[in-house]
Amino acid sequence: MTRNVIVVPPSLQAAHAWKILQRERIRHLPVVLDGKLAGILSDRDLLRLAHVQPSGELGFVERTVGDIMTLDPITCSPESSVAEVSRIMVDEKIDSLPVIADGRLVGLVTSTDLLLLLVDSPEARLPFEYQLADPPLFV
């Protein structure tokens, strides 16, 4: 879990949010209003609005984070287990989960955080055997 979470207000322009994501090398920005989690913005949310400018850089329409964020994101508590957080993220097909305590954002769990748990655990093994399809399946 990341404890020092970079947050943004809903009034921030989309282009500025993109610059923050790029500068900090992150993919999610919790959106906070009056100290409370109002939503979450992902790089995918922004890329849906992006267009390539003649310079080759991405440009964004004049929209605010509040216009494009996911409202009322799914959250967890600091007491949530790794298994519970993982299951929520898989079931909901999301890559981050804000951690809320007493109504306040206290952290953010990302898919990268979960993968790092495996990297730090050399005894971790896949719980199943796998076999390639013969012939391989292509869609």
Image (spheres, grey):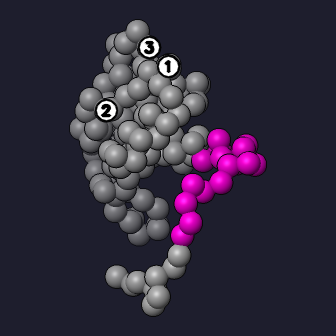
Q: Earlier in the sequence, mark 1 or mark 2?
A: 2
The range drawn in magenta is 115-130
Name the residue rendered at 25%, 33% in the picture: 71
Decide: few, some or many residues near mark 3? Use Cα within 10 Å; few <14, some 14-19, many ≥20: few
Which circle's residue, 2 or 3, is located before the other in the chain? 2
Give the distance between the C-alpha atoms of the residues marked 2 and 3, in whole angstroms.
Answer: 15 Å
Quadrant into which the C terminus falls: bottom left
Answer whether labels 2 and 3 touch (C-beta < 8 Å).
no
Q: Given the image, on which type of amino acid does mark 2 rest?
A: Pro
SS type, badge 3: strand
SS under mark 1: loop
Which is nearer the eye, 98 or 85? 85
Task: Identify the residue shown where x is 55% and y is 60%.
Answer: 128
Identified by mark 1, the residue type is Glu
Disc 1 packing (10 Å; few <14; some 14–19; many ≥20):
few
Snapshot quadrant of residue 8: top left
Closer to the observer: label 1 or label 2? Answer: 1
Which disc is residue 79 wearing?
1
Cα separation between marks 1 and 3: 9 Å
Q: Are marks 1 and 2 in contact (CB under 8 Å)?
A: no
Residue that label 3 marks: 101
The residue wearing badge 2 is 73
Taking depth in this image into account, of 90 and 28 the one nearest to the observer is: 90
Q: Earlier in the sequence, mark 1 or mark 3?
A: 1
